[in-house]
Image: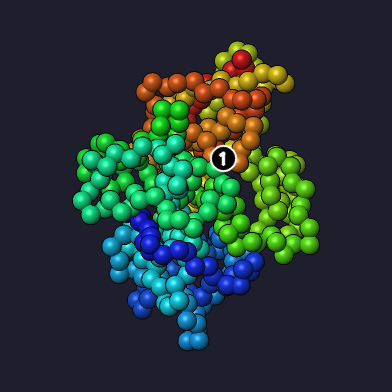
Protein backbone atom coordinates (compact mmCIF):
# COMPACT_ATOMS: atom_id res chain seq x y z
CA UNK A 1 0.00 0.00 0.00
CA UNK A 2 1.33 3.38 -0.89
CA UNK A 3 0.93 6.04 1.70
CA UNK A 4 2.29 9.41 2.47
CA UNK A 5 4.11 10.55 5.54
CA UNK A 6 5.17 13.84 7.01
CA UNK A 7 1.73 15.33 6.73
CA UNK A 8 2.18 17.87 9.44
CA UNK A 9 5.37 19.36 8.04
CA UNK A 10 5.42 21.59 5.01
CA UNK A 11 7.37 20.19 2.13
CA UNK A 12 10.99 21.23 1.95
CA UNK A 13 12.53 21.37 -1.46
CA UNK A 14 15.73 20.01 -2.93
CA UNK A 15 18.27 22.56 -4.04
CA UNK A 16 19.14 24.52 -6.01
CA UNK A 17 15.75 25.52 -7.34
CA UNK A 18 15.73 25.30 -11.13
CA UNK A 19 18.26 22.45 -11.15
CA UNK A 20 17.84 20.37 -7.99
CA UNK A 21 20.38 17.68 -7.22
CA UNK A 22 19.03 14.74 -5.24
CA UNK A 23 21.64 12.49 -3.62
CA UNK A 24 20.64 8.89 -3.04
CA UNK A 25 21.99 5.61 -1.81
CA UNK A 26 20.75 2.06 -1.46
CA UNK A 27 20.43 0.48 1.95
CA UNK A 28 22.95 -2.35 2.49
CA UNK A 29 21.73 -5.55 0.87
CA UNK A 30 19.28 -3.87 -1.52
CA UNK A 31 19.03 -6.57 -4.21
CA UNK A 32 20.91 -5.67 -7.38
CA UNK A 33 18.14 -6.80 -9.75
CA UNK A 34 15.72 -4.33 -8.18
CA UNK A 35 18.18 -1.44 -8.12
CA UNK A 36 17.62 -1.13 -11.86
CA UNK A 37 13.88 -0.47 -11.35
CA UNK A 38 14.80 2.34 -8.97
CA UNK A 39 17.32 3.75 -11.45
CA UNK A 40 14.71 3.61 -14.21
CA UNK A 41 12.31 5.63 -12.04
CA UNK A 42 15.00 8.24 -11.38
CA UNK A 43 15.76 8.39 -15.11
CA UNK A 44 12.03 8.80 -15.75
CA UNK A 45 12.03 12.03 -13.73
CA UNK A 46 15.38 13.20 -15.07
CA UNK A 47 13.99 12.99 -18.60
CA UNK A 48 10.93 15.07 -17.68
CA UNK A 49 12.18 17.60 -15.14
CA UNK A 50 15.28 19.65 -14.28
CA UNK A 51 16.15 17.30 -11.38
CA UNK A 52 19.27 15.16 -11.35
CA UNK A 53 20.00 12.23 -9.05
CA UNK A 54 23.49 11.26 -7.99
CA UNK A 55 25.03 8.86 -5.50
CA UNK A 56 25.30 10.39 -2.05
CA UNK A 57 28.67 11.10 -0.50
CA UNK A 58 29.58 11.38 3.17
CA UNK A 59 29.34 15.16 2.81
CA UNK A 60 25.61 15.09 1.93
CA UNK A 61 23.40 15.88 4.88
CA UNK A 62 20.22 15.30 2.85
CA UNK A 63 19.84 12.13 0.82
CA UNK A 64 17.30 9.48 -0.11
CA UNK A 65 18.09 6.01 1.21
CA UNK A 66 16.23 3.31 -0.72
CA UNK A 67 15.17 0.80 1.90
CA UNK A 68 13.96 -2.65 0.87
CA UNK A 69 13.36 -3.90 4.45
CA UNK A 70 9.99 -2.20 4.53
CA UNK A 71 6.29 -2.82 4.92
CA UNK A 72 4.73 -1.25 1.86
CA UNK A 73 5.90 1.71 -0.18
CA UNK A 74 6.29 5.14 1.36
CA UNK A 75 8.33 8.31 1.34
CA UNK A 76 8.72 11.48 3.31
CA UNK A 77 7.16 14.50 1.65
CA UNK A 78 9.95 16.72 0.35
CA UNK A 79 13.49 16.95 1.61
CA UNK A 80 14.39 16.33 5.21
CA UNK A 81 17.60 17.73 6.56
CA UNK A 82 18.95 14.23 7.10
CA UNK A 83 19.16 10.87 5.35
CA UNK A 84 15.56 9.96 4.65
CA UNK A 85 14.29 6.48 3.93
CA UNK A 86 12.25 5.81 0.84
CA UNK A 87 10.62 2.51 1.65
CA UNK A 88 10.14 -0.06 -1.09
CA UNK A 89 8.97 -3.50 -0.01
CA UNK A 90 10.12 -6.26 -2.31
CA UNK A 91 8.65 -7.27 -4.67
CA UNK A 92 5.36 -5.36 -4.21
CA UNK A 93 6.81 -1.86 -4.70
CA UNK A 94 9.17 -2.76 -7.50
CA UNK A 95 7.62 -1.09 -10.50
CA UNK A 96 8.80 2.10 -12.15
CA UNK A 97 5.39 3.67 -11.54
CA UNK A 98 5.38 2.97 -7.80
CA UNK A 99 8.96 4.16 -7.33
CA UNK A 100 8.21 7.27 -9.43
CA UNK A 101 5.13 7.88 -7.25
CA UNK A 102 7.26 7.77 -4.09
CA UNK A 103 9.88 10.00 -5.73
CA UNK A 104 7.10 12.49 -6.46
CA UNK A 105 6.42 12.58 -2.71
CA UNK A 106 10.15 13.06 -2.14
CA UNK A 107 9.97 16.08 -4.46
CA UNK A 108 7.31 17.43 -2.09
CA UNK A 109 3.91 16.41 -3.46
CA UNK A 110 0.99 15.07 -1.47
CA UNK A 111 -1.82 12.93 -2.87
CA UNK A 112 -4.42 14.44 -5.18
CA UNK A 113 -7.28 13.44 -2.86
CA UNK A 114 -5.57 15.46 -0.11
CA UNK A 115 -6.14 18.69 -2.02
CA UNK A 116 -8.15 21.36 -0.23
CA UNK A 117 -10.74 21.28 -3.07
CA UNK A 118 -11.24 17.51 -3.03
CA UNK A 119 -14.80 17.60 -1.62
CA UNK A 120 -16.00 18.96 -4.96
CA UNK A 121 -14.71 15.86 -6.72
CA UNK A 122 -14.77 12.91 -4.33
CA UNK A 123 -16.60 11.72 -1.27
CA UNK A 124 -14.67 9.70 1.31
CA UNK A 125 -16.57 6.90 3.08
CA UNK A 126 -15.00 7.29 6.50
CA UNK A 127 -17.03 4.33 7.86
CA UNK A 128 -15.06 1.97 5.61
CA UNK A 129 -11.52 3.12 6.48
CA UNK A 130 -9.37 0.75 8.50
CA UNK A 131 -8.75 1.83 12.08
CA UNK A 132 -5.56 3.83 12.44
CA UNK A 133 -5.47 4.69 8.72
CA UNK A 134 -7.77 7.71 8.82
CA UNK A 135 -4.80 10.10 8.60
CA UNK A 136 -4.26 8.97 5.00
CA UNK A 137 -7.46 10.77 4.01
CA UNK A 138 -6.77 14.08 5.67
CA UNK A 139 -6.85 17.15 3.52
CA UNK A 140 -3.56 18.89 2.90
CA UNK A 141 -2.19 21.31 5.43
CA UNK A 142 -2.18 25.01 4.71
CA UNK A 143 0.75 26.28 2.70
CA UNK A 144 0.61 23.62 0.04
CA UNK A 145 -0.25 24.97 -3.40
CA UNK A 146 -1.96 23.25 -6.33
CA UNK A 147 0.18 25.38 -8.67
CA UNK A 148 -2.92 25.96 -10.77
CA UNK A 149 -3.15 22.31 -11.73
CA UNK A 150 -6.66 20.85 -12.05
CA UNK A 151 -7.95 18.01 -9.87
CA UNK A 152 -7.09 14.89 -11.84
CA UNK A 153 -8.62 11.51 -11.00
CA UNK A 154 -6.15 9.75 -13.30
CA UNK A 155 -3.07 11.22 -11.64
CA UNK A 156 -0.37 8.82 -10.53
CA UNK A 157 -0.66 10.59 -7.15
CA UNK A 158 -4.36 9.76 -6.65
CA UNK A 159 -5.30 6.87 -4.40
CA UNK A 160 -7.18 4.00 -5.93
CA UNK A 161 -10.84 3.76 -4.83
CA UNK A 162 -10.39 0.86 -2.38
CA UNK A 163 -7.40 2.29 -0.50
CA UNK A 164 -7.39 1.25 3.19
CA UNK A 165 -10.91 -0.23 2.90
CA UNK A 166 -12.25 -2.50 5.64
CA UNK A 167 -14.69 -4.05 3.19
CA UNK A 168 -12.59 -4.50 0.05
CA UNK A 169 -15.72 -4.79 -2.07
CA UNK A 170 -16.67 -1.22 -1.25
CA UNK A 171 -14.67 1.88 -2.16
CA UNK A 172 -13.38 4.34 0.38
CA UNK A 173 -13.24 6.99 -2.36
CA UNK A 174 -16.29 7.74 -4.49
CA UNK A 175 -16.18 10.12 -7.43
CA UNK A 176 -19.00 12.67 -7.06
CA UNK A 177 -21.95 12.02 -9.41
CA UNK A 178 -20.79 14.61 -11.95
CA UNK A 179 -17.47 12.71 -12.23
CA UNK A 180 -18.82 9.17 -11.99
CA UNK A 181 -17.10 8.19 -15.23
CA UNK A 182 -13.73 8.58 -13.48
CA UNK A 183 -14.50 6.08 -10.68
CA UNK A 184 -12.29 3.47 -12.38
CA UNK A 185 -9.64 5.95 -13.53
CA UNK A 186 -7.98 6.73 -10.21
CA UNK A 187 -4.37 5.68 -9.72
CA UNK A 188 -2.63 5.72 -13.07
CA UNK A 189 -0.02 3.65 -14.84
CA UNK A 190 2.53 6.44 -15.36
CA UNK A 191 2.96 10.09 -14.37
CA UNK A 192 0.42 12.14 -16.29
CA UNK A 193 1.04 15.43 -18.07
CA UNK A 194 -0.11 17.31 -14.96
CA UNK A 195 1.92 15.09 -12.59
CA UNK A 196 4.97 16.16 -14.57
CA UNK A 197 4.03 19.83 -14.90
CA UNK A 198 3.50 19.97 -11.14
CA UNK A 199 7.12 18.97 -10.40
CA UNK A 200 8.40 21.38 -13.04
CA UNK A 201 6.40 24.24 -11.55
CA UNK A 202 7.44 23.41 -8.00
CA UNK A 203 11.10 23.48 -8.98
CA UNK A 204 10.81 26.41 -11.43
CA UNK A 205 12.42 24.20 -14.04
CA UNK A 206 11.80 26.45 -17.02
CA UNK A 207 12.41 29.81 -15.31
CA UNK A 208 16.07 29.61 -16.34
CA UNK A 209 15.19 29.12 -20.01
CA UNK A 210 16.17 32.13 -22.18
CA UNK A 211 12.68 32.04 -23.66
CA UNK A 212 9.52 30.00 -23.27
CA UNK A 213 8.66 27.87 -26.29
CA UNK A 214 5.55 28.56 -28.37
CA UNK A 215 3.94 25.22 -27.82
CA UNK A 216 0.80 24.07 -29.58
CA UNK A 217 -2.00 21.81 -28.42
CA UNK A 218 -1.52 22.49 -24.72
CA UNK A 219 2.20 21.80 -24.54
CA UNK A 220 4.57 23.66 -22.24
CA UNK A 221 8.31 24.30 -22.30
CA UNK A 222 9.99 21.04 -21.33
CA UNK A 223 11.46 21.12 -17.82
CA UNK A 224 14.32 18.90 -18.97
CA UNK A 225 15.09 20.80 -22.20
CA UNK A 226 14.48 24.49 -22.83
CA UNK A 227 14.55 23.96 -26.61
CA UNK A 228 11.50 21.79 -26.93
CA UNK A 229 7.96 21.46 -25.69
CA UNK A 230 6.59 18.85 -23.34
CA UNK A 231 3.43 17.62 -25.05
CA UNK A 232 0.10 16.23 -23.91
CA UNK A 233 -0.86 12.78 -25.14
CA UNK A 234 -1.41 12.51 -28.87
CA UNK A 235 1.09 15.26 -29.79
CA UNK A 236 4.82 15.36 -30.43
CA UNK A 237 7.44 17.41 -32.25
CA UNK A 238 9.44 20.41 -31.04
CA UNK A 239 6.27 22.48 -30.64
CA UNK A 240 3.73 19.66 -30.16
CA UNK A 241 2.65 20.40 -33.71
CA UNK A 242 2.28 16.88 -35.06
CA UNK A 243 0.94 13.41 -34.31
CA UNK A 244 3.36 10.71 -33.06
CA UNK A 245 4.60 8.59 -35.98
CA UNK A 246 3.80 5.37 -34.11
CA UNK A 247 0.17 6.34 -33.50
CA UNK A 248 -2.48 4.63 -35.61
CA UNK A 249 -4.84 7.11 -37.21
CA UNK A 250 -8.30 5.79 -37.89
CA UNK A 251 -10.99 7.66 -39.79
CA UNK A 252 -14.45 7.39 -38.32
CA UNK A 253 -17.61 7.62 -40.45
CA UNK A 254 -21.32 7.71 -39.69
CA UNK A 255 -21.69 3.96 -39.90
CA UNK A 256 -20.41 1.99 -36.90
CA UNK A 257 -17.08 0.25 -37.13
CA UNK A 258 -15.10 -1.73 -34.61
CA UNK A 259 -11.58 -0.63 -33.70
CA UNK A 260 -9.47 -3.38 -32.21
CA UNK A 261 -6.35 -2.51 -30.24
CA UNK A 262 -4.25 -5.18 -28.61
CA UNK A 263 -0.90 -6.18 -27.14
CA UNK A 264 -0.38 -9.91 -27.04
CA UNK A 265 3.32 -10.29 -27.75
CA UNK A 266 5.84 -11.26 -25.06
CA UNK A 267 5.99 -8.52 -22.46
CA UNK A 268 9.37 -7.10 -21.55
CA UNK A 269 8.74 -3.53 -20.37
CA UNK A 270 6.04 -0.85 -20.20
CA UNK A 271 4.18 -0.88 -23.50
CA UNK A 272 1.60 1.41 -25.03
CA UNK A 273 -0.41 1.85 -28.20
CA UNK A 274 -2.22 4.96 -29.31
CA UNK A 275 -5.11 5.11 -31.74
CA UNK A 276 -6.22 8.54 -32.92
CA UNK A 277 -9.82 8.49 -34.06
CA UNK A 278 -10.71 11.20 -36.52
CA UNK A 279 -14.19 12.17 -37.69
CA UNK A 280 -15.06 14.76 -40.35
CA UNK A 281 -14.93 18.39 -39.22
CA UNK A 282 -18.00 19.42 -37.26
CA UNK A 283 -18.74 15.85 -36.16
CA UNK A 284 -18.22 14.17 -32.82
CA UNK A 285 -17.22 10.60 -32.09
CA UNK A 286 -19.31 8.15 -30.10
CA UNK A 287 -17.37 5.21 -28.67
CA UNK A 288 -18.69 2.14 -26.89
CA UNK A 289 -16.45 -0.52 -25.33
CA UNK A 290 -17.40 -3.84 -26.90
CA UNK A 291 -14.87 -6.08 -25.19
CA UNK A 292 -11.90 -5.95 -22.87
CA UNK A 293 -9.89 -8.95 -21.86
CA UNK A 294 -9.09 -11.72 -21.49
CA UNK A 295 -8.36 -10.65 -17.90
CA UNK A 296 -10.31 -8.20 -15.78
CA UNK A 297 -8.76 -6.00 -13.14
CA UNK A 298 -10.18 -3.96 -10.26
CA UNK A 299 -7.64 -1.20 -10.72
CA UNK A 300 -6.18 0.14 -13.94
CA UNK A 301 -2.64 0.81 -12.73
CA UNK A 302 -0.97 -2.02 -14.61
CA UNK A 303 -3.19 -2.73 -17.61
CA UNK A 304 -5.94 -0.66 -19.18
CA UNK A 305 -7.53 1.27 -21.97
CA UNK A 306 -7.82 5.02 -21.56
CA UNK A 307 -10.37 6.82 -23.68
CA UNK A 308 -9.63 10.55 -24.03
CA UNK A 309 -12.74 12.20 -25.49
CA UNK A 310 -11.55 15.80 -25.03
CA UNK A 311 -9.70 17.84 -27.65
CA UNK A 312 -7.59 19.18 -24.79
CA UNK A 313 -5.61 16.06 -23.89
CA UNK A 314 -3.69 17.53 -20.98
CA UNK A 315 -5.94 15.79 -18.45
CA UNK A 316 -6.07 12.02 -18.45
CA UNK A 317 -9.22 10.30 -19.66
CA UNK A 318 -11.60 7.51 -18.72
CA UNK A 319 -9.92 4.20 -17.97
CA UNK A 320 -11.19 0.67 -18.42
CA UNK A 321 -9.50 -2.49 -17.22
CA UNK A 322 -12.52 -4.80 -17.24
CA UNK A 323 -15.54 -5.03 -19.48
CA UNK A 324 -17.91 -2.27 -18.25
CA UNK A 325 -21.47 -3.26 -17.44
CA UNK A 326 -23.39 -1.45 -18.77
CA UNK A 327 -21.09 -0.18 -21.51
CA UNK A 328 -22.17 3.43 -21.77
CA UNK A 329 -21.24 5.33 -24.94
CA UNK A 330 -18.63 8.07 -24.58
CA UNK A 331 -19.01 11.10 -26.85
CA UNK A 332 -16.09 13.35 -27.74
CA UNK A 333 -16.20 17.13 -27.46
CA UNK A 334 -14.79 17.56 -30.96
CA UNK A 335 -13.92 15.51 -34.03
CA UNK A 336 -11.07 13.52 -32.53
CA UNK A 337 -10.78 10.99 -29.73
CA UNK A 338 -7.79 9.05 -28.38
CA UNK A 339 -7.69 5.38 -27.41
CA UNK A 340 -4.58 4.63 -25.35
CA UNK A 341 -3.88 1.02 -24.47
CA UNK A 342 -1.11 0.34 -21.98
CA UNK A 343 0.36 -2.46 -19.92
CA UNK A 344 2.98 -2.48 -17.22
CA UNK A 345 2.71 -6.18 -16.45
CA UNK A 346 2.78 -9.46 -18.26
CA UNK A 347 -0.83 -9.81 -19.36
CA UNK A 348 -2.04 -9.99 -22.95
CA UNK A 349 -4.75 -7.42 -23.54
CA UNK A 350 -7.27 -6.84 -26.32
CA UNK A 351 -9.89 -4.12 -26.44
CA UNK A 352 -12.60 -3.68 -29.03
CA UNK A 353 -14.36 -0.35 -29.32
CA UNK A 354 -17.33 0.42 -31.53
CA UNK A 355 -17.06 3.92 -32.98
CA UNK A 356 -19.13 6.16 -35.23
CA UNK A 357 -19.34 9.80 -36.17
CA UNK A 358 -22.40 11.57 -34.77
ZN1 LIG B 1 1.65 8.01 -2.09
Q: Which quadrant holds residue 175?
A: top left
The residue nearer to you, when weighing 156 against 301, is 156
Residue hosting label 1: 315
Indicate the quadrant containing the C terminus: top left, top right, bottom left or bottom right: top right
**Ligand 1 contact, mark 1 (Cβ < 8 Å):** no
Residue 228 vs 261, above or below: the answer is: below
Q: Secondary structure at mark 1?
A: loop
Describe residue 229's horizontal placement relative to residue 41 as left or right. Answer: right
Give x and y (percent) for residue 326.
38, 21
Residue at the image position 52 percent from the left and 23 percent from the top = 330
Residue at the image position 64 percent from the left and 66 percent from the top = 18
Asked whether residue 338 appears in the rendered view, the answer is yes
Give x and y (percent) for residue 354.
52, 21
Give x and y (percent) for residue 332.
59, 25
Asked whether residue 106 appears in the rendered view, the answer is no
The residue nearer to you, when weighing 81 against 254, is 81
The residue nearer to you, when weighing 209 against 145, is 145
Residue 346 vs 62, above or below: the answer is: above
Residue 82 vs 192, above or below: the answer is: below
The residue most toward the top is 255
The residue most toward the front is 142
Residue 281 vs 266, above or below: the answer is: above
Describe residue 180's horizontal placement relative to residue 145 as left or right. Answer: left
Residue at the image position 55 percent from the left and 43 percent from the top = 150
Amino acid sequence: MRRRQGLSSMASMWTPSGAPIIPYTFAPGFPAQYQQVVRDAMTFWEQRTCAKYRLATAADTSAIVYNHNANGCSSAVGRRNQRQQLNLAIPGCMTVTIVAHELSHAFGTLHVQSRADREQYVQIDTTNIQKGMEHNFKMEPNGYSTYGIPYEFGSMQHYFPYAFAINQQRPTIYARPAYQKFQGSMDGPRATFWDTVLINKMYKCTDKCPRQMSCQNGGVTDGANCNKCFCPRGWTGTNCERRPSDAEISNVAASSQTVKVEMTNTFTAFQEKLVILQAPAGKRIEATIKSFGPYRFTMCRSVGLEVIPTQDTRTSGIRFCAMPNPSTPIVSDGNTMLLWLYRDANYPVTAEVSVRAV
